[in-house]
Amino acid sequence: MSDRHWVVFRQSHGLGSDDVFSILVQDNAIWFGTANGISRYDGRWQTFAVTQSGDAANGEPENLGRITAMASTEDGATIWAAGSNGILSRYEDGTWAVIQRLGTSVNALEYVNGELWLATDRGVLVQRGTTVEAVAKLGTETAHALAAQDGFVWVATDLGLWRVAPDTDSVTFVEVRDENGAPIQGPFLEVTVVPPDQLWLGTLDKVVVFSPGAARGQSFPPFSTNAGNPQISSIVHSPGRAVWAGSESGGAVEYGLSTDGITGARNLGSSAGSGLSTNSVRDVAIDANGSVWFATAVGVFRYQPWAWNVVDERYDFLPVHDLLVGSNGDLWIATGGEGVQRHRQNESQPAGYLPDESGLPGETVYDLAQSPSGQLWAATNQGAAYFEQDQWRRDKALL
């Protein structure tokens, strides 16, 4: 995979720390939770290492610490962040301030219908107004991830998957079975909603696709066996095209999607030889442009699937006058000195057409066109020609 698809951001660029745990995407900026506070990127870096104390008697700022979770309101005006020190902070009007001291590490945040839900090492908490309450019926087992769907909140915990009704705080344990009907044991480390009705779940060693109304799901061990328990850390949906999963020790995997389901999968990470040069992925996020961001132990990686590729470096300093995608998907290139080049979809090497070998009238080609019947034409510095049976031919009427 070409390195031009990848960019790496580190502390030397302005990131608060190379040790990155969480990502929050907004329309105008991307936020990163690091081991040393929060960094904001909008083309330029801004880092916040401290938060203002909520204690009026002691207004000294204190360290934000390691930020493992962030969430925002729908309009992005308010952002919350929390982490291993148990402090919940809120960002408004350019400043971070302490809102609550929770006394437990926070693993995930989810803003649902005006309420902030928190998955912590001591169960699930909900901030309603100025108070924080525990969802007592879930107990104090570690909650790792949250997802909202159809008026419910899904909770991934050490023991399994739970569904919570926010209006009543009633909870239901949902047994997840694999394709063979065997129960899938916890811990469940991640849960993500993929429309219209799927839940994608992460465990220590596999990704599970599950529909709550179905009797069985489907599990995928996405990473190489030498990764041991890769520990799925993040799952994110790129609408209409893919689902990405990250892991603590197995890198990342992209699942291609179509209307018929999963079309394939590919691994990224240091062992896969991709631009993602680490296997330690803590979080994955996708921005409005389709770029995929990875929070890792060695910085932030950005992958742009749509980045430009050089298809043939011989043309670096050669004029290209026209491009045409044929009806069969082949790419035709009109050059200023190398005739016509043809790139077939399933072939890595292009075919070149020069006057001495192919019948093309001239080496400089100004324009390409295809007729409704599929006939390809080229306008050169020595006249026009059409393409037939892998040769260029002159039309006698044009001579």
Image: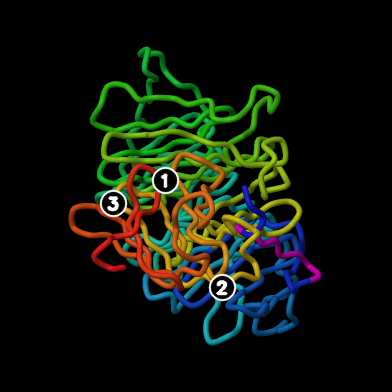
Residue 194 horizontal/vertical position (percent):
34, 45
Please report the residue visible at 44 percent of the width from the left and 45 percent of the height from the top: 344
Q: Which of 38 and 91 is in front in this view?
A: 38
Q: Which callout, 3 or 1, points to the residue nearer the camera?
A: 3
Label 1 secondary element: strand
What residue did someone put label 1 on? 242
Residue designated by label 3 = 327
Foreground pick, 175 / 219? 219
The residue under label 2 is 319
Q: Which three-letter amino acid code belongs to the residue tagged 1? A: Ala
Give the Cα distance between marks 3 and 1.
27 Å
Q: Which of marks 1 and 2 is in front?
A: 2
Residue span colored magenta:
5-12
Indicate the position of residue 139 as horizontal and vertical percent values. 48, 38
Identify the secondary structure beneath mark 2. loop
Label 1 near label 3: C-beta < 8 Å?
no
**Tag 3, which secondary structure?**
loop
Point out the tag, 3 or 1, that comes first from the N-terminus.
Answer: 1
Q: Which of marks 1 and 2 is nearer the N terminus?
A: 1
Density class for disc 1 (Cα within 10 Å; few <14, some 14-19, many ≥20) is some
Residue at figure coordinates x 44%, y 25% from the top left:
219
Q: Indicate left or right for 7 with 75 as reference.
A: right
- The residue type indicated by label 2 comes to Pro
